[in-house]
Image: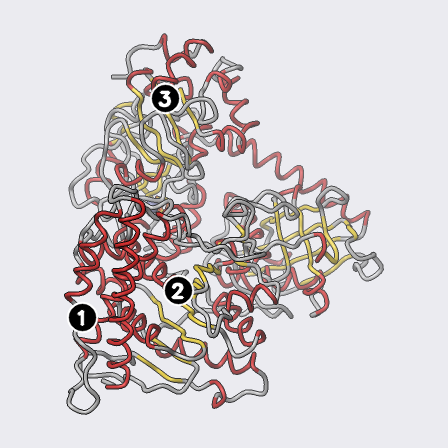
Amino acid sequence: MSRYIARAAIRGANMIVGEAEQMVTSAVEDLGADTPVAFTNTAYYLPVILGFTGKEVTTLGQLPEVVDHAKKLLVDAPAKSLWLPYLGETLDAGAATLLAFEAMEGVRFARGQQPEPIQGLNLTGTSFTSPDSNGGARGDGGGFANGPIDDIQLRAWGIQLVDGRMPGFAAIVGAARSNEAAVSIVRELQKRNILVFLSGNVNGRSIIHQLMEEGVEMGYDTYIVPFGTDTISAIYALGFATRSALTFGGMTGGAVRDILLYNKYRVFAFVLALGEVDDLKYAAAAGAINYGFPVIADTLIPQILPTGVTTYEHVVSMPFDDIEGATDAEKARRMIQRCMEVRGVKVKITDVPIPVPYGSAFEGERVRKADLRVEFGGSKAHAFEYLRMVDTDQVEDGRITVVGPDFADLPEGGAMNLGIVIEVAGRKMQEDFEPVLERQVHYFVNGASGIQHVGQRDITWVRFSKGAVDKGFSIKNIGDILYARYHGEFGAIVDKVQVTLYTDPAEFEKWLGRARDAYQQRNVRLADMVDESVEEFYSCTLCQSFAPNHVCVVSPERLGLCGAYNWLDCKASYQINPTGPNQPIPKGIPLDKDLGIWQGSNAFAYQNTHQTVERVSLYSIMQDPMTACGCFECIAIIIPEANGVMVVSREDPSMTPAGMTFSTLAGVCGGGIQTPGMMGMGKYYLLSKKFISAEGGLKRVVWMSSFLKDTMAEDLKAVCEREGDPELLDKIADERYVTTVDELLPFLEEHGHPALAMESIL
Ligand code: SF4
Ligand code: ZN
């Protein structure tokens, strides 16, 4: 233990706890003890305070207690010579610092000072519309840091965080040596799918400014989240860590030991301190060490190396000037490599031989008009993608061909046609898997930095940025990406892959025709695929790592509640990984055809939920509904007063007639328990003939988030017609008209909603 660090951290902690006390006292005086205190879009109150103390802070009046708690953790800064450094006291000072930080951010929220305004900062959101639009720009059109991460976003990242595809996060505090180093640091982390959290500054300059100057897109879509330009905003990273333990680890507020251990062993995270480390940063670092997160600094500071108890370093110094490398970018790359070693997790990087960086973190990147070199598809040209299975002697593995001209002669921002044809062969390949594999094109192509892919089938739209083309990215590289990724991810079912890219007009038309025939045949085949037509369903138990008694029973007519797995996906996944989370469930004897209950699915559920779920019905919300983990796209819940059901989507933050918002409902409905009258569901289940068919199907729906109505308008209209009520969609209320039960009933009367005349749902 370094006495220097201990002294600095304890000094910093004493200083900031004092400051927090003043801030809290004057806020209580100015605004009153009853003034609400809340972080936005979270059900976890002030999460670090909740984790450490179990207190659910909702008003300013509760904060003095928190400050008192922090004060009790403090000792005086040890005198220079006499004191034997003690890790425990330093860690306590760190904990006190975190409580002070979060209390201060709570006050700032109460005063309307959070998220921090940052001139010119535009964040990318999650809801993507078109490449030129601002997407879901947050913070009222930008100009603000992100502040704390939403529960919605935490859960959206959930499966990836749980299964390790997203290893964790890097909390960066300060400013990099140069802009070049800053960009290189975040690119290296993005490549490894590691979330990047930004805060702090050095003499007023923050890495957030550096990335803005370099035009790096920040926001949820690119996995780079700027919290704020002061050290205090780094608390949001630890709030995220705490909520991970509460959400995915099933821990409760106040179980501080469990929460910290969960993070130490399950969350891959570290702190990267860039630039000079002052007392406050030492204090914050001591807070992070409580979570088992090591701190790596790019300046010369004393280190804390492994002790008997710990196997890795707590504090590592890597003076930037001493790192080998000709450029700052190279040094930064080495530094990140070292961070990986210190935290000790092997991150798999897919090796894709193309001239631009590649990784899932680039999936959300947009290519805007101003940066556009060439586009395929969109409004000025057509593009399609088509994956088909062929006999093995018809595929030459690794053959990538471009048939037709390249875009060199096109003006900047020009458009041309492109057909992407992927032919695969493999002993385990089945025609059924064609759409499953084809859908991956979107994710695979989007992983290239500076390349954007939207849509599927014959409405594909691909954009190349000027930057990517300047680096040498070509049409052929699309084939390189697809070849590498199909082998990498689907090697179990695909033995050979060949890709042909058609720009030649005659060949393009010829293959477009073939592709359209195939899409048509697939549509017919999918429509024929009903629960009655198959012998087995599939399970998904991926979410058991955080909801141990949850099983999704996935049938052709009901997809997994996260929306990511339908029956075909599960079937393919079982072929790829026969001992994985998707197992076949032989249906067995039907016990109730209306409720959708089979002997086989009951038995599977019982066995795989630690004997807690005995019966599960696939078609009912009232009787033995399916359990819910936490990652549902939508929540359906009955509104007894309206004799119907409402469906709220994750994207909808508004109040619902159930008297709760989505995030509050999610807390009630998740965790892997059966709650009659309530269930989580994938949004496409709404379109199924089996959607709560036991209760009357879509006609039972009295309220639905407008997001669902708008994004699935065509499909829902077709369902309304199928159900014999073409105007049904307009009879269903949404948050634009109705947010309470009292408003709901007159709306339904006025629009003549069928649920009012249906038999009682209870
Ligand atoms: Fe989790 Fe169900 Fe989605 Fe599987 S299908 S990942 S169990 S929500
Ligand atoms: Zn889940």
Q: Quadrant of ligand 1?
A: top left
Name the foreground residue: 305 vs 548. Answer: 305
Tell me which numbered mark, 2 or 3, is placed earlier along the sequence: 2
In x, y percent, where is residue 261?
A: 21, 65
Q: Is residue 265 visible?
A: no
- Quickly name the residue at label 2: 169
Give the residue at mark 3. 693
Q: Residue at x 53, y 15 (%)?
A: 726
Q: Amino acid at mark 3?
A: Ser
- Which corner quadrant of the image does residue 410 belong to? bottom right
Query: Which mark is first along the chain, 2 or 1?
Result: 1
- Other residues around mark 3 within 10 Å, as few (<14) / some (14–19) / many (≥20): some
Question: Disc 1 to disc 2, how far (Cα)?
Answer: 28 Å
Alpha-carbon span between mark 3 and mark 1: 60 Å
Q: Amino acid at mark 2?
A: Phe
- Who comes first in sequence, dot 3 or dot 1? 1
**Mark 2 or mark 3: which is in front?**
2
Nearer to us: label 3 or label 1: 1
All told, the count of numbered labels is: 3
The quarter holding residue 356 reads: bottom right
Closer to us: 94 or 380: 94
Image quarter of the C terminus = top left
Residue 500, given in percent of the width and then of the height, sits at: 69, 56
Check the image and tell me how it is coloured.
Answer: secondary structure
The answer to whether the residues at label 2 and label 3 have Cβ atoms under 8 Å apart is no
Element carrying mark 2: strand
Residue occupied by mark 1? 74
Which quarter shows the N terminus?
Answer: bottom left
